[in-house]
Image (spheres, rainbow, N blue to C red):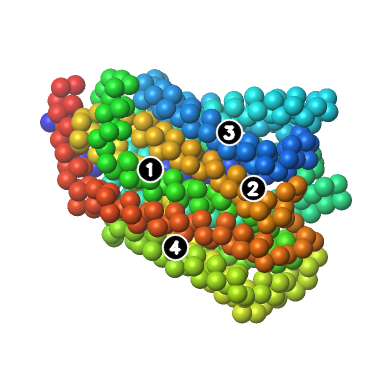
Amino acid sequence: MKEVSSKYYGENGIHRVPLWRIGGFALNNTATNLYLFFMNYVSYYLMGFVGVGMMVASSFAMMMRLWDGVTDPFVGFMVDKTNGKFGKNRPFMVIGNAILLVTSFIMFHVTHKLPENTALRFAFFIIFGAIYYLGYTCQCVVTKSAQSCLTNDPKQRPLFASFDGVYNTILFAGVAVVCSNIAAKYLDIGGYASTAFFHDFWVFTAVLSAILTAIAVISIAPKDRTEFFGTGKPVKVGLRDYWETLKGNRAIQMLVVSASTDKLGSSAKTSAVTVAMFACIAGSTKLQGSVTALTTIPSCIVTFCFISYFATKLGQRKAMLLGSIGGLITNALLACLWLFGDPTSMVANVEAGTIHWGYFVILYLVLTVIQAGFQGISGNIVIPMTADCADYEVYRTGKYVPGLMGTLFSFVDKIISSFAPMIAGVVFAMVGFTDHNPQQGDVVTRSLVYGVVFLAFGMISIGLICNLIALKFYPLTKEKMAEIQAEVAAIKAKAALEG
């Protein structure tokens, strides 16, 4: 047997990577999530400076996510065809992030300077938004497609989800604090709906995302080579192979169902919903930052421990099953707390956003931390599970199509999750908010509380139920993956001999 030349490659066909490179590459997903969080505030800009109404602003996000999904198959095909001096994945990371930086700057710095014509401004925003999401697709695809070449060690592969879960917890908690502080800084000129807010937020997003992308590129570099791609040698892939994969790979079919419904649920809890929870229902804009500061570190620890322990001990399928059941229980308890408790009791000082320590805030903090651990498993383990699906396709047909796996996953995910902002907009409109999102000072009705609880906890629970159904038909158990890795190792050994 001709040995594949790499200090990370073992004789048994298992190739590993230093832990820091897994953690470093996971930052690629964080880099794109920064822009995802940034775009969560687009409705404030569209209503404040473009001149469109609530429903149109909510529909924009849906239209762009649909477009984002349409571009996925094309980008995935290009990834599968690419294998140059700079690797298969790194070019798309760099190009994608550059497109995001430039187009987002134009969208939020130029649109409001155009003549005061709603149709003109909206058309301009849509054109550059379409280019923006093409860049977003380029960088997002790599998060999934590079998983299979990063490592195939069943004990290492889930660790990506551990890092990713921690990063996302820090990201969404930290950025929420940053946003609320920026908004408070410019409260006298519109807060979230001021050009100064979007400028500061854009600078923060663009600079940090570029730094994280650079770290991810460096981290994946040694493994972004042909010898780690599926069979160990280039394989010609055509459009017909894509159809055969879609039709025959039950694992990716079930994973798409699970992940897309999860994403729809988590996306329904948009920035507007979070603002409605804390600024409107609880009564203080700054309260979110105070609560987040207390939950971030414990949530990171619990998320990392849950994923690292359960996924490596039980396998990724059983870990996701456990995470879904635990998530259902904690989301149900959180929903009951907000429906039957008194959220206003959380606030000691409305202006400062300081916390009043009582039963509500204690229960909310404890349940939020536990929920983060379970949600971290079900929400983040799907990315390394995509690599299992790519290996399964090599085992099943001998074809290595990680771009297809990543973009199929993303395509359906984006199509379904694109409805989340519109769902939030429809729910807010149904409870009486047709011209603006709920904010501090608005009258809190019982229907608003029901609507916010449904968006924050009910939608996620529906996604978790779909997980349980999909996992009944997902074939890649821990034992099956051991069989698959042995067969893939044999395919690579044969390729090495022929090479």
Q: Earlier in the sequence, mark 2 or mark 1?
A: 1
Residue 144, image x, y percentages: 40, 38
Q: Residue at x 33, y 54 (%)?
A: 469
Contact flag, marks 3 and 2 (Cβ < 8 Å): no
Establish if 49 lies above or below 498: below
Q: Residue at x 14, y 28 (%)?
A: 494
Q: CA distance from mark 1 to mark 4?
A: 19 Å
Q: CA distance from mark 3 to mark 1?
A: 20 Å
Q: Is residue 255 visible?
A: yes
Point out the frontmost of discs 2 and 1: 2
Q: Earlier in the sequence, mark 3 or mark 1?
A: 3
Left or right: 458 as drawn, with respect to 390: right
Q: Earlier in the sequence, mark 2 or mark 4?
A: 4
Point out the frontmost of discs 2 and 4: 2
Q: Residues within 10 Å of mark 3 (few under 14, many from 20)?
A: many
Q: Amino acid at mark 2?
A: Gly
Q: Quadrant of the C terminus?
A: top left
Which residue has dot 1 on it? 256
Outermost residue toward the left in this view? 1
Contact flag, marks 3 and 1 (Cβ < 8 Å): no
Q: Amino acid at mark 3?
A: Met
